[in-house]
Image (cartoon, rainbow, N blue to C red):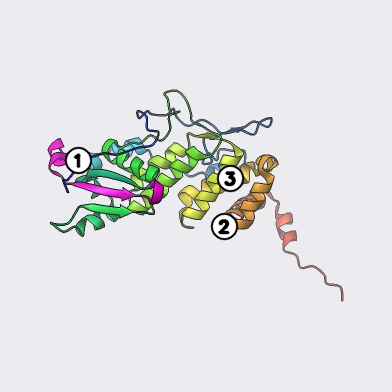
């Protein structure tokens, strides 16, 4: 079988990469079901302790331009691409199965894929099978490897913030985030998380995103989990009027989510309460015999 000579990546719905505008402040329209976000992740809601709860993402652009990365790429030239073998990656299964190709030198930057490459034999096909991975997320990973950025929606245009009423946009970024964690690429994680901040969404989309985050990330990943819980702790009294049944269902089915939201609310109440109230809450009650 002839080896492909050029890398081919099919990116569903791909458009030219653009740089979204800086994150907008999250606001809630009480007369509409749409919630304008700096994302689920924007926790700048009223509350004395909000600043302490927020997680500040590193400056990804500064990281990409850092001296360390520049030093890493200083000896790189296009010849490295041309002399690097082409690897075939089969992603997904069934009707979604997609064959992609990429230069091996770029795949080696992901520890998980590097392990596959090391197992290649000189006479065997250079092929990696990833049936459990999402085709769209993996194509965005390859786009990032070649361009240091990725684009997932046609609505991303200069000066506009993505409108996501269905939740598809949030979930696509979230899948890239979890894939980057699996591949061992923290920079891609930060970029995808940063893009989540720039999405405007609806309450239903927010719930779908919260469910995905709490069922596909480890408990220790507070970088993505805590902003989700903080957002719902700040907004649930408003949003549950629109998605009350679904919100209740999520709280029952994903106890970690409801516990994190409740913890934030109770911690806030404790910080705002007086000493007498705190003392009284611990007083032993008299029992009738």
N-terminal label among 2 and 3: 3
Q: CA distance from mark 2 to mark 3?
A: 14 Å
Q: Residue at x 33, y 48 (%)?
A: 185
Q: Are marks 1 and 3 in contact (CB under 8 Å)?
A: no
Mark identifier at residue 25: none
Task: Please state the extent of the stretch shown in magenta in the rendering.
Answer: 74-96
Q: Which mark is residue 207?
A: 3
Q: Residue 57: horizontal and vertical position, in percent? A: 43, 42
Which residue was labeled with disc 2? 256
Residue furthest to the right: 289
Query: In which quadrant of the rendered view does residue 288 lie?
Result: bottom right
Taking the image as shown, residue 87 lies to the left or right of residue 215, namely left
Task: Say which of marks 1 and 3 sits in front.
Answer: 3
Q: Secondary structure at mark 2?
A: helix
Q: Is residue 57 visible?
A: no
Give left or right: position of 257 versus 275: left
């Amino acid at each position: 079988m002839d080896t492909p000579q050029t890398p081919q990546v099919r990116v569903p719905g791909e458009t030219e990469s653009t740089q979204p505008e800086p994150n907008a402040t999250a606001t809630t329209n009480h007369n509409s079901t749409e919630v304008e976000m700096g994302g689920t992740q924007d926790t700048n809601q009223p509350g004395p302790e909000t600043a302490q709860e927020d997680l500040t993402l590193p400056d990804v652009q500064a990281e990409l331009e850092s001296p360390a990365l520049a030093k890493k790429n200083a000896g790189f030239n296009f010849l490295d691409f041309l002399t690097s073998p082409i690897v075939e990656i089969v992603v997904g299964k069934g009707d979604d199965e997609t064959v992609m190709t990429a230069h091996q030198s770029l795949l080696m930057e992901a520890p998980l894929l590097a392990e596959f490459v090391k197992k290649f034999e000189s006479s065997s096909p250079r092929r990696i099978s990833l049936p459990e991975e999402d085709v769209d997320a993996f194509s965005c990973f390859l786009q990032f490897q070649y361009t240091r950025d990725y684009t997932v929606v046609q609505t991303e245009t200069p000066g506009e913030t993505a409108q996501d009423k269905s939740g598809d946009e949030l979930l696509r970024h979230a899948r890239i985030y979890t894939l980057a964690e699996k591949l061992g690429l923290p920079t891609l994680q930060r970029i995808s998380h940063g893009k989540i901040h720039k999405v405007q969404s609806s309450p239903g989309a927010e719930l779908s995103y919260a469910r995905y985050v709490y069922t596909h990330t480890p408990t220790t990943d507070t970088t993505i989990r805590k902003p989700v819980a903080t957002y719902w702790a700040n907004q649930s009294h408003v949003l549950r009027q629109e998605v009350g049944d679904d919100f209740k269902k999520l709280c029952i089915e994903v106890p970690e989510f409801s516990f994190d939201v409740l913890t934030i609310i109770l911690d806030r109440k404790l910080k705002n309460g007086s000493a007498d109230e705190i003392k009284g809450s611990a007083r032993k009650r008299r029992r009738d015999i």
